[in-house]
Amino acid sequence: MTPSFQSQILLVEDSDDAVVILRFLLEREGFCVLHASDGKQAQELISKMPPPALAILDVMLPFMSGLQLIRLIRGKREWNSVPILMLTSDEAERDVLDAFAHGAKDYVKKPYNPKELLARIRNLLASEA
Amino acid sequence: MSLYVVWIATYSISCFCIITFSFILTLRTARTVGAAKKRAFISQWRPVLTQCLTTYPEALPLLKRHERRLFLHLWVTFQESVTGEAHARLKRLARELDLHKIALTYTRPHRGDLALLAVTALGHLQESHAWETLAQLLSHSNRTLSLAAARALVRIDTVRGLSLVLPFLATRQDWSVLNTSLVLKEIGQSISAPLLAQQALSRSSDVAARLITLIKAIRGLSALPLVRKLIERHPNDVTIVCAALDLFSECHDPRDLPQIRHYTLHSNWIIRLHAAMALGKMGTLDDEIRLMALLSDSEWWVRYRAAESLSGLPVMTRRRLAELAEAVPDKSNADLIAHFVHHADFYHRNARCPSLA
């Protein structure tokens, strides 16, 4: 699926450098990236904005974990079907299991291969289309 | 005379104020200039590094002398964020900018964070000229730096690096298991786990247990035959047996189930405790009866873990656990099970079939 410029992605990540990399990769593919750097900011965005095409969440975040954010997203009716992709560290096997149990659709381990990340995003969007 | 004293005092205070003010002004100016230089660096180099994620840049800006430290930091951050072709392009970029030579000049331990970044960069760049420097850092008292050196060495040459690092893995208790497992994952569990187990066979109980814990951290399935041999040799060594039981429960090899079940009957309660926990992770429904028997153990912790493990058995449901709690004659043991009726994490296992939960 080729994304249109209207395809919004909510990116919740607290590391500035990681955001620069992800934003570059996603915008290059034609996505519009909305960024929140912590759980509180993400909560605010979720309460205000219409559901995006996809949400990418880091597991470890200030104020609220990625898993809590999944619960929040799944608890909101309009956002219920937004596919969620989790970014996890290599050691966090438990986080992956928890993320799936809470309703995440896929995950990518850091460090990630940019091509693989984009392929997973495309797959998620195609399966939701 | 008094006028003279007043004049001297006023003069001294004025001088002090002027010097202090000048000092603050100099510091603030230096900080502002430093921040401006950093901004200029970021705006110039971050796009170059981000471009490397997809294509190699046609022309590179000149890396100025004062930008070297900032570049090292930015490059390591990017290098540790991605894998695949982007990783290779970032390495090519660093080589072209002589980052391997720059990093080598920063490896002295007194340089603190900079030394850590330099060592990490040298590992990523597989810089063989740094071998001796990195090997010396293995025994440095700074555990973060020595572990980074270990990781860099195995990145540069896995086989040679492993032979150098292996003795330190056993003896450096200050290297955390989590961070040491990152070094072992660089090597790959299929290579490192059997070597760790081989070392464990000839070491004291404490060292052997630490090595088994490291094998567990990398889920070293390939080491299981040697670890089984180790507990055959030391069937009553509490430290070794407990570490081995923890490893078995992590690896989930059904061939270890008879051994785990056997240890639920051991005379040492700490071993029974670890066996009960292991059964919770890899036991079958057949183990319900064993765990129920452990509820009569003389040690409270064994009874508690047995109750917890009952809730962890496959296809165990809240309803079944409540029935078991009712069937236990002793009220305090029934309460232990009842605790897990309310708090056990049935959700994950029964998420696909909510009626079970």
Image: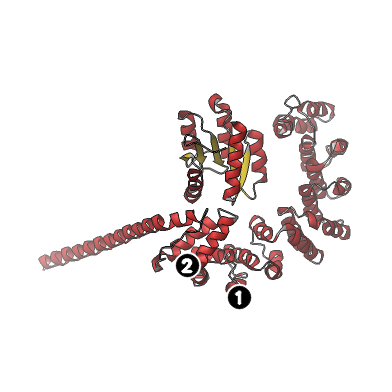
Answer with the quarter of the image where residue B187 lies.
bottom right
Residue placed at 83% from the left, 37% from the top?
B295
In this rendering, the label closer to the viewer, 2 or 1? 2
Distance CA(mark 2)–CA(mark 1): 23 Å
Q: In this view, does B183 lie above or below A59?
A: below
Numbered disc 1: secondary structure? helix
Residue placed at 61% from the left, 42% from the top?
A120
Q: What amino acid does circle 2 point to?
A: Leu
Residue placed at 66% from the left, 35% from the top?
A101
Which disc, if any, is residue B132?
A: 1
Q: Which chain carries label 2?
A: B
Residue placed at 45% from the left, 29% from the top?
A48
Assess disc 2: are there few (<14), some (14-19) or many (≥20) residues with their C-alpha within 10 Å of its C-alpha: some
| N-term-proximal mark, 2 vs 1 | 2
Q: Which chain carries label 1?
A: B
Residue B284 left/right relative to B52: right
> Horizontal and vertical percent for residue B188?
71, 59
Same chain shared by disc 2 and disc 1? yes
> Horizontal and vertical percent for residue B6?
14, 64
Q: Which of B216 and A45 is in front in this view?
A: A45
Q: What amino acid does circle 1 point to?
A: Glu
Q: In which quarter of the image is the C terminus of chain B?
A: top right
> Horizontal and vertical percent for residue B44?
40, 57
According to the image, label 2 marks what residue? B97
Q: Quadrant of the N terminus of chain B?
A: bottom left
Q: In this view, does A117 lie above or below B14?
A: above
Residue B250 left/right relative to A120: right
Asked whether residue B112 appears in the rendered view, the answer is no
- Which color mode does the image show? secondary structure
Numbered disc 2: secondary structure? loop
**Circle count:** 2
